[in-house]
Image (cartoon, rainbow, N blue to C red):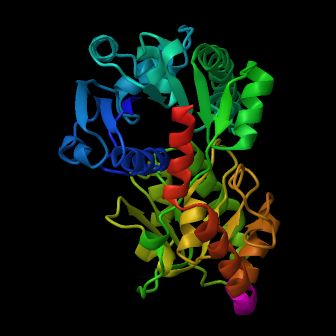
């Protein structure tokens, strides 16, 4: 097949779950098909283009500027978002240059399939009816959960407004595209029920079993959280854990340590780490695996989010037991008490962490069950083959 893949960024440096999912899928497709990749080059990075040949045959970078979330320009975008009918997170990636390039390529090449990867690229597609939307989350659900967890009325109102606009925009796009590929059946069900989308299929989340296979590592921490620390759901999760769950754990285990591993931690997270010598905030690291291998329990205390969390399957492949909220494990093929521990309140979450830290026999049982799950069903080759079959259809 000849494929056109359109995305709002490039896949290196790979620091986010969505990038990993796209990269592994494309690497598989690239071995079998001719892949043309159009991406917004923002922010420019030497790795972005230098490594594009790992997953595509032809690459078309589009210069674009997106305001940094800590800049004055981002504040201006948020203010403009009060009057704009489009969601702020969509408007930031509007590119007429990308639209022209896609139009040029579709006129010149005879593509067998066109993939719009993530919702934010959809506004730049000249003909939505000819493309498949690869939808890693139900974006409106994430914004609604932001509103539900907002700390003050102003934030609640702003997030609620964005959720309403995202629901309208997302529903329209999902109905206009040729078909939608979701990453979980719960997401697909929401699209069918709330958006009236008839043509929606699912592919599960995968993991590189060999890459994460356990190796000897220096002790890192009792507990580890892995995830991009400039993503609001992750920031909320870590703050909730440090402020409400960790104090409960330390009543029974005073020396309990925590490693927060992820790029661009917010000022709040850096400050929380600086105030506690047993909390390590790493920022960007070249390899997250040693932190997994050197920790006792991987935590996923998400209260906001959508799609599926790759970090859970990665921890399972690394043979680290996982404690998650129901939202954190949403859409994954996991079973409470069998291959994962799940709790949604602070006391319950603390109890689950302590039990796995203290009970080595139970810990081994959970780990082996989890590893058997991901090894037998969720290698990237298996997952990407399912994606390929959907494109062929």
* Of the pair 215 and 295, the residue shown nearer to us: 215
The question of residue 127 being in magenta is answered with: no
Quarter of the image that includes the C terminus:
top right
Q: Tell me where residue 41 sits by quadrant.
A: top left
Quarter of the image that includes the N terminus:
top left
Residue at the image position 71 percent from the left and 34 percent from the top: 188
Would residue 289 be seen by someone viewing this image from the given angle? yes
**Position in image of residue 273 (x %, y %):** 48, 64
200 vs 78: above or below: below
Q: Tell me where residue 185 sits by quadrant.
A: top right
Residue at the image position 73 percent from the left and 72 percent from the top: 339
Residue at the image position 31 percent from the left and 45 percent from the top: 55
* Of the pair 226 and 149, the residue shown nearer to us: 226
Q: Main secondary structure of the magenta part?
A: helix
**Position in image of residue 132 (x %, y %):** 53, 26
Would residue 235 be seen by someone viewing this image from the given angle? no
**Position in image of residue 50 (x %, y %):** 18, 46
Does 155 sit left or right of 112 as displayed?
right
Does 264 sit left or right of 305 as displayed?
left
State how many labels appear.
0
**Position in image of residue 225 (x %, y %):** 55, 64
358 vs 247: above or below: below
Span colored in magenta? 357-362
* Of the pair 286 and 261, the residue shown nearer to us: 286
58 vs 280: above or below: above
Does 378 sit left or right of 93 as displayed?
right
């Amino acid at each position: 097949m000849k494929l056109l893949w359109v995305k709002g960024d490039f896949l290196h440096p790979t620091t986010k779950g969505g990038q990993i999912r796209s990269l592994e899928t494309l690497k598989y497709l690239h071995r079998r098909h001719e892949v043309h990749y159009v991406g917004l080059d923002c922010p420019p990075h030497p790795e972005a283009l230098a490594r594009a040949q790992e997953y595509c045959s032809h690459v078309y970078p589009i210069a674009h500027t997106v305001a940094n979330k800590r800049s004055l320009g981002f504040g201006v975008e948020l203010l403009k978002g009060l009057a704009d009918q489009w969601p702020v997170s969509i408007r930031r990636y509007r590119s007429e240059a990308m639209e022209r390039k896609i139009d040029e390529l579709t006129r010149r090449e005879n593509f067998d399939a066109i993939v719009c990867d993530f919702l934010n690229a959809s506004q730049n597609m000249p003909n939505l009816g000819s493309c498949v939307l690869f939808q890693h989350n139900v974006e409106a659900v994430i914004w609604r959960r932001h509103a539900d967890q907002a700390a003050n009325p102003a934030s609640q109102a702003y997030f609620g407004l964005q959720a309403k606009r995202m629901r309208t925009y997302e529903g329209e796009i999902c109905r206009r595209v040729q078909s939608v590929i979701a990453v979980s059946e719960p997401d697909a069900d929401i699209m069918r029920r709330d958006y009236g989308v008839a043509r929606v299929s699912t592919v599960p989340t995968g993991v590189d079993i060999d890459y994460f296979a356990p190796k000897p590592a220096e002790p890192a921490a009792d507990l580890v959280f892995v995830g991009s620390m400039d993503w609001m759901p992750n920031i909320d999760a870590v703050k909730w854990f440090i402020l409400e769950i960790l104090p409960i754990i330390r009543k029974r285990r005073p020396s309990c340590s925590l490693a927060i591993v992820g790029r661009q931690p917010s000022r709040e997270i850096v400050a929380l780490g600086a105030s506690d010598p047993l909390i390590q905030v790493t920022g960007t690291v070249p390899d997250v695996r040693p932190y997994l291998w050197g920790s006792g329990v991987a935590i996923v205390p998400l209260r906001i989010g959508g799609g599926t969390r790759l970090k859970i399957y990665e921890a399972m492949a690394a043979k680290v037991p996982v404690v998650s909220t129901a939202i954190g494990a949403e859409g994954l093929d996991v079973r409470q008490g069998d291959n994962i521990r799940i709790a949604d309140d602070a006391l319950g979450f603390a109890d689950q962490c302590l039990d796995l830290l203290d009970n080595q026999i139970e810990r081994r049982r959970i780990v082996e069950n989890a590893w058997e799950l991901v090894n037998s069903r969720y290698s990237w080759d298996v997952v990407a083959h399912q994606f390929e079959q959907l494109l062929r259809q």
